[in-house]
Amino acid sequence: MDPIDRLREDLIEAGTFGRIPPERVERYDQLDPQKGITRPTGTEANKKFRDYAVERMKEAGLAVTVDNIGNIFGKKEGFKNTKGTVMFGSHADSVTNGGMFDGSLGVFGAIEAMRRINEEGFENERPLEVVIFTGEEGSAFKQTLLGSSVLTGKTKLQQALGMKNDEAITLEESLKNIGYHGASLRGLDDIEYMVELHVEQGPILSKENMPIGIVENITGIAWLMVTIAGQENHAGTTPMKMRKDALVAASEIISFVNKRANDMVNELGASTVGTVGKLNVFPNGTNIVPGRVEMGIDVRDVNKENMENLKNETLEIIKRIEEKYGVDAEIQMPITHNPVPLSQEVADIIEKSAKQIGISSKRMNSGAGHDSQNMAEKVKTGMIFVPSINGISHSPMEWTDWEDIKKGAKVLTQALKNLSRQKK
Amino acid sequence: MDPIDRLREDLIEAGTFGRIPPERVERYDQLDPQKGITRPTGTEANKKFRDYAVERMKEAGLAVTVDNIGNIFGKKEGFKNTKGTVMFGSHADSVTNGGMFDGSLGVFGAIEAMRRINEEGFENERPLEVVIFTGEEGSAFKQTLLGSSVLTGKTKLQQALGMKNDEAITLEESLKNIGYHGASLRGLDDIEYMVELHVEQGPILSKENMPIGIVENITGIAWLMVTIAGQENHAGTTPMKMRKDALVAASEIISFVNKRANDMVNELGASTVGTVGKLNVFPNGTNIVPGRVEMGIDVRDVNKENMENLKNETLEIIKRIEEKYGVDAEIQMPITHNPVPLSQEVADIIEKSAKQIGISSKRMNSGAGHDSQNMAEKVKTGMIFVPSINGISHSPMEWTDWEDIKKGAKVLTQALKNLSRQKK
C-alpha cells in the first residue's frame, strides 16, 4: 500500500471510533454536523482508538509501554542510545461531537513516520518514541492537557487519578476499565526532543493556501468570568434615568474587548485576540430591563505583556462601568496560562526538513492549547500544523485535505530523521 | 367595617386566589418571591376571583351580567338614565407569578367606590357600571387586552373565542368551564366615560412620594426581534481580522438603543424608553466566537414620532452594523401599537376630584399597556395610578401601601360622583 493510503486508512478507520453510527468518512462532502467524533478518555470509543493504535505500533516493531496515567509509548532504539530520545505524537481523546483529525492525525502521523523510517532502512542515531497522551481535551475529566501535565510533573499523579468524570467514575477506574492503567510513570530525563503534528484549528494556513505551519509560540490564555448585577425593572414604566441595566453595562465591556484587541493588532502588530463567547441574561424577557448578566471573556496572546495588558485594561474598564451604570461586577479568573515559546532549534530543523523535500512552510503561533506546551517546559519541543478548512475544529465539520495530510506526514518524517541525527 | 378595611379585606382575600399555598398576605414584609399570584383566564384561581367579585357586586345591589367574551358588568341605574353611563373597573387575570394588586385593585376599588356611593346616599344622574375585563395580561391566551379588544370591536369575537391556551383548550371552552361565557356581547353605545384605577407598575410616584397619578397618555410600543448571523469560530485560533462576531455586532445595537433613548430624553425632554431585554448567544461557549445572537428590542413612547424615530434609527443602525461586521440581520416586528391619548376632560375631573378631598396628584403617562387604551378609542377614558414600591410589578414583590390604596379609592369615588353629574 502507498504510504499515504496507509495513513489515510488509519485515520478513516480511527474516525469510526466514537462516531454514531460508526461510518467511514472519506471525503469532506460526507461530513454530517450531527455525526461527529465523541471519544473522551475512558469511553469504549477511546479504548478502540487506543487498541487500534497499539496494534499498528506493534506491527511497526515498536516496544509498547503504558504509564499509570494512561499515556502510551512505542519505542524504537537508536544506534546511539546514549543520546536523548526524539519523542513525537499527540492525544487519544476528542471533545464531544468533534472532528476526526484533532489528535488522531498526530498519533497516526507519528506511527506512519515510524513505518517509513523503518521501510527506508534509515538508521536513527537517537531513539525514536511515539507518544499518545491521555485526556488532552478535558472532555471527560475536566482538566485539559492531563496526560502531559502528569508526565511533566505539573499535576500530581494521585490528584489526577482521583478526578471524576460526569458519571462520578475516577480516572483511575476509567483507565483500569479500558485496560490502560500502567504500573509506573515514565520519566522525561532520557528525552531530548518532542514534535507534535496537529491540525491548525484556525483559518490562517487554509486562507494563505500554505500546507505547513511551524509553531513558534503557544498562546497564553486568561479567562475572566464576570457577573454584572444591575436592577430588574419593567421596560415600559422605568424611565431611562432610573435604570441599572446589566446588559447595557455588559455590551460596553464586549465592545471594549473587541476594539482594544483590534487596536493592539493594528497598532502593535500583535496577535492578541479578545472574545466574549458566553453571555446569559436574566430574566431575559424583551419587556424587562436586564437585572443580571453572566459573561465569559477569553483573552489570548503569545506575548505575555499583551495578554496581561488586555486583561488588566478590561478589569479597569469593568470598574469604570460599575461606576458609570451603578452596577456591581463580580469577577472570577478560572484560567490563566502564560504563553509558551517552543524550541527555535526544533523549528529550524522542521523548516529545513520541509525545504529538503520541497514543501513550503511558514512560521506561526498557536492560538489553541496543546500537550506540547507542557512538554516545552521540560524538553526541546516543536509543532507542525496542517491546514483546517475554514479554520473549523472541535466540530464534526473539521476537515484537512488528504494532500495536506500527506505533506504533514512527510515533513514530520524528514524532521524526525534530522532530529535523530542532531548532534547537540 | 371602615371602608378602607373593607377594601383591604377584599384585596387580601382575592390575593389568596392563585397563590400557592393560598396564604393571606397583609404586609410588605410577608411577600415571598417564590409565592406570587398566578391567575390566568380560565384557571380555578381566575374563577374564584370572579366568583368573589360577583358576590361583592351583588351585595352592593348591582345588576350583574356577563358577556360572551367573559367580561363581567355590574350596573346601578342613574336617576337620569338617558345620559351615557360611567364605566369603571379593571381586569380579572394576572401574569404567571405576579403581584396581588395588578388588576385586582381596579376591580375591588371599583366595587368599594360603588359601596361608598350607596352608603352616602349619593344620587348618581348617569348610570354607574363596574367592569371586569377578561384576559388583559395574555398569560393564558396569547393576545393581551383581549376582553377590551373584543368589547371595542378591535378583535372579532369568534377569533378570540377560538384562541387556544398552552393546554390547547379554546377560550370559549375555558369560559364555559368556569361559568363565565355569557349569551351576547355588550355594546358600548350607552357608555360615555371609562375610568380605571391601577398600580403604576413604575417607580415615578414612589420616588416622588406622590399618592395619585393621572394618566394623560398610554405609551406606544414597538418590538424588534433581531437575529444576527455571524460566523462561529475558535476564539483562540481565529485572528481578529477574520471574525464575524455576532455578539460584538449585537452589543453595538444594545449601546445604540440605550444611548439614543437617553439622548432623546435629555435633548427633547421625551419620555422615550428603549430596552434590549432579551438576548441569546449561540453556541455560547467562552472560547467560541459567537456565530448567532437572537435579541428582543422594546421601544416605547407616548409620542408617536419619537417612537417611530427610535425604531427607524435602530433599523438603520442594524443595516450599518451588517456592513461593518459582515453579519446578516433578520428582523421581525411582532408588536406595533401606537400611543393612545386619554381624555383631557376625564383627567381634569379626576384632578378636580383629588383636590376636592385634599389629595395631591400629578399628571403622568403610562409606560405599560392597559384595557383603557382600547376603551379610549370608543369612549372618554381616564386612569388613576397609585404608587408601586420600587416600581416593581409583574412580580410577587409588587406592593402598594394601604394608605395609597385608600387614597386611590377615595379619588376614584369622588371622580365617579363628579362624572355621574357631568353635563356634557
Image (cartoon, coloured by chain):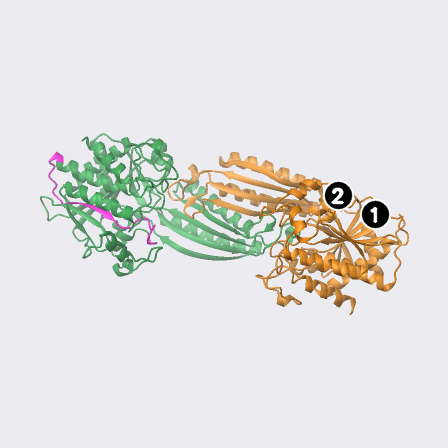
Chain colours: A orange, B green
Same subunit: marks 1 and 2: yes
B134 is within the stretch colored magenta: yes
Residue lying at 13% horizontally and 37% vertically, measured from the top left: B118
Magenta range: B119-143
What residue sits 21% from the left and 49% below the top?
Answer: B72
Query: Which residue reaches farthest left?
Result: B79
Which chain hosts label 1? Answer: A
Residue A136 in view in this figure: no
Q: Left or right: where does residue B133 sit relative to residue A364?
A: left
**The numbered mark 2 sits on a residue in which chain?**
A
Three-letter amino acid code at the position of disc 2: Thr
Q: Which mark is residue A152?
A: 2
Against B260, is A320 above or below?
Answer: above
Q: Secondary structure at mark 1?
A: strand
Seen as rendered, the residue at the extreme bottom is: A1
For mark 1, does the 10 Å Cα neighbourhood hold few (<14), some (14 to 19), or many (20 or more) residues? many
Q: Is residue B383 left or right of residue B287?
A: left
Residue B220 drawn above or below residue B364: below
What kind of secondary structure does the magenta stretch mostly adopt? loop
Amino acid at circle 1: Glu
Where is mark 1, residue-wise?
A: A192
Give the Cα distance between marks 1 and 2.
13 Å
Asked whether B418 or B144 is in front, the reply is B144
Image quarter for residue B60? Answer: top left
The image quadrant that residue A404 belongs to is: bottom right
Residue B42 seen by the camera:
yes
